[in-house]
Image: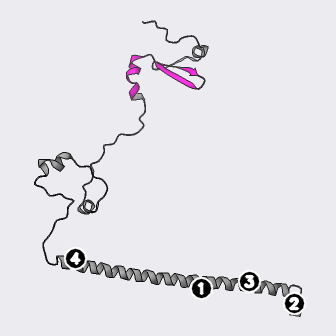
Amino acid sequence: LLDVYYLPLTNMRIARTFCFTNNGQALYLVSPTEIQRITYSQETCENLQEMLGELFTPVETPEAPNRGFFKGLFGGGAQSLDREELFGESAAGKASRSLAQHIPGPGGIEGVKGAASGIVCELARARIALDERGQKLGELEERTTAMLTSADSFSKHAHEMMLKCKDKKWYQF
């Protein structure tokens, strides 16, 4: 056995609060609000990490999903790429997945112009519908203010009628 003075007896609180527990551990009060735990058994000291709880359950990170054509074309945030894939021989024969490819066929520029004119027509319709909605909202606001003035007028006339008929009996009407 090795005889070592572990605790200095400068503070009697430590000596008064020192207690041994089972499984080779001891506890004592370092300060009025702090508890210190020590281990005096080699077996318990080796198993200490297993006795401690885990803060979270480790889960394997899943693979990143493949980026689609449209997400690559229109942008979908930053993408981390490998240097070898960007500048190396592995990418020499492959076309980039995020670039659009020209597919020859009928239409060409005329098809694009037709699509653009269709979009302009739809935007004009949307603007007309927006103007009509603004006019309807304006009419609704006017009707609401007219109803409010009518309600105020009715309330005023009802109050005047109540004051006029307040002192009359039922047979005087």
- What range is drawn magenta here? 28-49
Q: Position of residue 161 (x, y in %)?
A: 81, 87
**Residue 41 is inside the magenta segment:** yes
Mark 2 is surrounded, within 10 Å at the Cα level, by few (under 14), some (14 to 19) or many (20 or more) other residues, namely few
Going from the N terminus, do you reach mark 3 or mark 4 first? Answer: 4
Q: Are marks 4 and 2 in contact (CB under 8 Å)?
A: no
Image height check: is 130 above or below 76?
below
Residue 90 image position (x, y, % from top left): 12, 49
Q: Which residue is mark 3?
A: 155
Which residue corresponds to mark 4? 112
* Residue 146 as seen in the image, left or right of residue 102: right
Q: Nearer the viewer, mark 3 or mark 2?
A: 3
Cβ–Cβ under 8 Å for marks 3 and 2: no
Could you tell me how far apart the alpha carbons at marks 3 and 2 are, in whole angstroms? 23 Å
Spatial separation of the CA atoms under disc 1 and disc 4: 47 Å
Tags 2 and 1 in contact by the CB under 8 Å rule?
A: no
Label 2 sits on a secondary structure element that is helix
> Decide: marks 3, 1 in contact (CB < 8 A)?
no
Q: How far is the residue under mark 2 from the one under mark 1? A: 39 Å
Which is more N-terminal, label 2 or label 4?
Answer: 4
Q: What residue is disc 1 on?
A: 143
Q: Which residue is mark 2?
A: 170
